[in-house]
Image (spheres, helix red, strand yellow):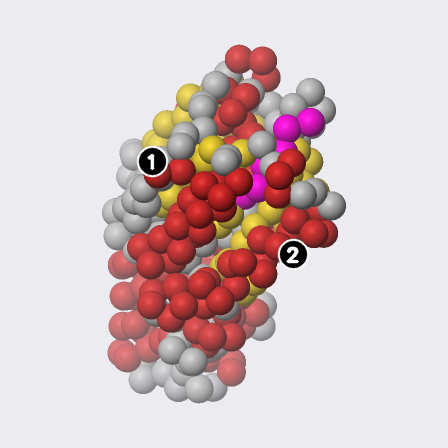
Amino acid sequence: MPKILAIETSCDETAAAVAEYGDKPFRVLDSVVASQIKIHMATNGVVPEVAARAHIQKISPVVKESLKKSGVDLEDIDVIAVTYGPGLAPSLLVGAEFAKGLALAESKKVLPVNHMLGHLYSALISNPKLPLPNINLIVSGGHTHLVYLATGKKGLPGKYKVIGSTVDDAAGEAFDKVAKMLGLAYPGGPSVAKAAAHGKKDYAFPRPMLNDKNYDFSFSGLKTAVLYKIAGEKLNVRDPQVQADIAMSFENAAIDVLVKKTIRAAKEYKAKSISISGGVAANQKLRAELDKAAKKIGLPLAIPAFELCTDNASMIANAAAIMLRQGYKPVEPEKIKIDPAADL
């Protein structure tokens, strides 16, 4: 069966995966992720140049480990897939240049993969027979999209269309900024969720753009409402209960908007399934609320495993396999170019 080596370095995770596809279902043989969380805790956020230096140190060992654990020799790899964007330019460059060098040395071709496409298709890894058309909610640190995914040929995903996106802060970005306001640890998403679990008082923050007829999102105003509440009532954000109450109130508002717009889109577009992807898809409350709402309208909800929500190379390998089966052709290494601002 054809084999793919996938490389992902769009932000602060150095990742590689080996997978196979073809007549049998797509299968990840091994996946390795080297996290930089501890490095970026010192600055309470990702510094691009620092992330790139860490990628340089980790990328060769990560790729070697993935190949070794998968039991596949580099010479037996048919295609090298690499994330070309969107993401941090210094980080993307490390992965792209490493993939180029590897491909040139081994006379391989390279398939450039959009990071967001990796997220879009990630629910299909464990749900390959997910009914289409599908409405996918992509929620990550830098992006919030609602995407309509049509039925394609031979059971493959077909054309996709972004029907809604954020007009300012992405959901994950808003979680990070609220975490900073509350003095919670980086990364902000898990910290806010952990604190929210102990919340008691709901401040009933606004639900921006909830009743708008479009499917766009806005989280900047919600973030500002949190800031004004803290400042206006002179709340002690070092008090664990205050942290918990603010975190719960913010999380309730953000998730309410995400869930209701996703469900409305599924109804309007006559979707046969709903899926969620991206780092914020690891949020337990979001998973539970969307599952509950999907069941009310009788649609299956597909959610990637936790390790497939955050950045990883398995989703890049999966997207590459789907692209190859759709007829996309890998290119010569020198044609690979990064695009930090790429979108779906």
Give the magenta-colored segment's residue range: 1-6
- Above or below: residue 335 compared with residue 166: above
Residue 125 among those drawn in magenta: no
For the stretch drawn in magenta, what is the main secondary structure? strand
Residue at 65%, 56% (x, y): give it. Answer: 65
Asked if labels 1 and 2 touch by Cβ distance under 8 angstroms, the answer is no
Residue that mark 1 sits on: 335
Residue at 53%, 13% (x, y): give it. Answer: 153
Could you say which quadrant of the image residue 328 lies in?
top left
- Above or below: residue 343 compared with residue 47: above
Residue 187 screen position, x and y as percent: 47, 68
Residue at 30%, 44% (x, y): give it. Answer: 339
Residue 274 screen position, x and y as percent: 54, 33
Q: Residues within 10 Å of mark 1 (few under 14, many from 20)?
A: few
Q: Quadrant of the N terminus?
A: top right
Q: Quadrant of the C terminus?
A: top left
With 272 as the anchor, is 268 left or right in this view? left
Residue 65 disc label: 2
Helix, strand or loop for disc 1: helix
Helix, strand or loop for disc 2: helix
3D distance between C-alphas at marks 2 and 1: 27 Å
Q: Nearer the viewer, residue 149 or 90?
A: 90
